[in-house]
Image (cartoon, helix red, strand yellow):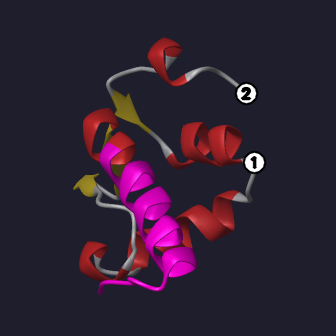
Amino acid sequence: MKELDQMPDILTAQHISSYLNISRRRVYELFQIIPELGGIPNFEIGASKRVDKNDFVSWINRQKEQKRLKYTGKEVR
């Protein structure tokens, strides 16, 4: 697994899979969910899905914040 700062600015499902230690299939499932409902924001280049690294970092931070709010009883959707 690479550190985020060593990863390219545009990420593939494989990059995300390695970083999160989840299957690529699960990454593609997260791509299918709209970001407002917890999916990973992504875009297409031809038939390939890609993720801007800044969007991925923001997504990670939102997941952490939602988890924190859930445990404090202040969950926001």
In the shown orientation, is residue 56 left or right of residue 19? left
Q: Residues within 10 Å of mark 2 (few under 14, many from 20)?
A: few
**Residue 76 part of the magenta-drawn span:** yes
Provide the residue designation for mark 2. Answer: 1
**Residue 73 part of the magenta-drawn span:** yes
Which residue is rendered at x = 44% and y = 51% of the image? Answer: 60
Q: Residues within 10 Å of mark 1 (few under 14, many from 20)?
A: few
In this rendered view, identify the residue nearer to me: 34 or 37.
37
Return the residue found at the far front.
Answer: 72
- Mostly what secondary structure, the magenta segment? helix
Q: Quadrant of the C terminus?
A: bottom left
The residues colored magenta run 58-77
Above or below — where is 29 with respect to 45? below
Provide the residue designation for mark 1. Answer: 21
- Which quadrant of the view contains residue 15? top right
Give how far across and how far down residue 61 sits, in percent.
Answer: 40, 50
Which residue is rendered at x = 61% and y = 43% of the image? Answer: 14
Residues at circles 1 and 2 in contact by the CB criterion of under 8 Å: yes
Give how far across and how far down residue 65 sits, in percent.
Answer: 41, 61
Return the residue found at the far top.
Answer: 6
In this rendered view, identify the residue nearer to me: 59 or 29.
59
- Residue 35 — which label? none
Which residue is rendered at x = 39% and y = 81% of the image? Answer: 33
In the shown orientation, is residue 19 left or right of residue 42? right
Above or below — where is 10 with respect to 74? above
Helix, strand or loop at disc 2? Answer: loop
Does label 1 or label 2 sit earlier along the sequence? Answer: 2
Tag 2: amino acid: Met
Tag 1: amino acid: Asn
Give how far across and how far down residue 7 sits, in percent.
Answer: 48, 20
